[in-house]
Amino acid sequence: MPKADKLQGSLDLLVLKILSRRPGLHGYAIMSAIQDASGEVLRAEEGSLYPALHRMEETGWIRAKWVTKETGRRARIYELTAAGKKQLASEESRWQAVTSAVNRILRTV
């Protein structure tokens, strides 16, 4: 079985997309959602995800709040802001352009 790839330059896009579909996730749930949705191909590591979440919160793309789970544990959950939705559209557009260019190269080289 191939080793799951670490995310290279697409973490913001994936986190924003996951949160657009499933608001109110905590960090570990976001990591699991990325891995599950990618068929175990992509993996967001804690050392990359949490700094990215912090940066996206500072930028205003997401907001976070502390909640107490049924188990009594506290968790920090995240949701998209209006600025985050706008950034997601921009990131998706950029991703489409990049993947289109890569596909053109793969077909012609």
Image (spheres, grey):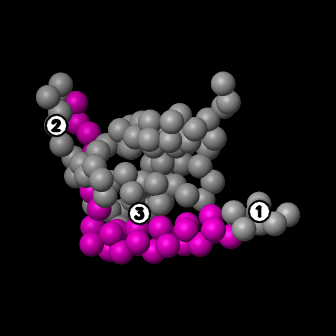
Q: Residues within 10 Å of mark 3 (few under 14, many from 20)?
A: some
The residue that label 1 is drawn on is 107
Q: Between marks 1 and 3, how big is the CA–CA gap?
A: 36 Å
40 or 69: which is nearer to us? 40
* Image position, residue 102 (x, y; %): 70, 64
Point out the tag, 2 or 1, that comes first from the N-terminus: 2
11 or 75: which is nearer to us? 11
Where is the N terminus found, in terms of image quarters?
A: top right
Q: Nearer the viewer, mark 2 or mark 1?
A: 1
Q: Quadrant of residue 37?
A: top left
Q: Is residue 59 visible?
A: no
Which residue is depicted at the point 45% across and 48% down?
A: 50
- Element on which disc 2 rests: strand
Q: Is residue 82 visible?
A: yes
Point out the tag, 1 or 3, that comes first from the N-terminus: 3
Which residue is depicted at the point 66% across and 31% down?
A: 3
The residue that label 3 is drawn on is 56
- Element on which disc 3 rests: helix
* Kind of residue at badge 3: Met
Horizontal side of residue 9 vs 12, given as left or right: right
Q: Is-magenta flag for residue 48? A: no
**Mark 1 in CB contact with mark 3 (< 8 angstroms):** no
The overriding secondary structure of the stretch rendered in magenta is: helix
* Image position, residue 45 (x, y; %): 53, 40
Q: Between marks 3 and 2, how big is the CA–CA gap?
A: 23 Å
The residue that label 2 is drawn on is 68
* Kind of residue at badge 2: Thr
Q: Between marks 2 and 1, how big is the CA–CA gap?
A: 51 Å
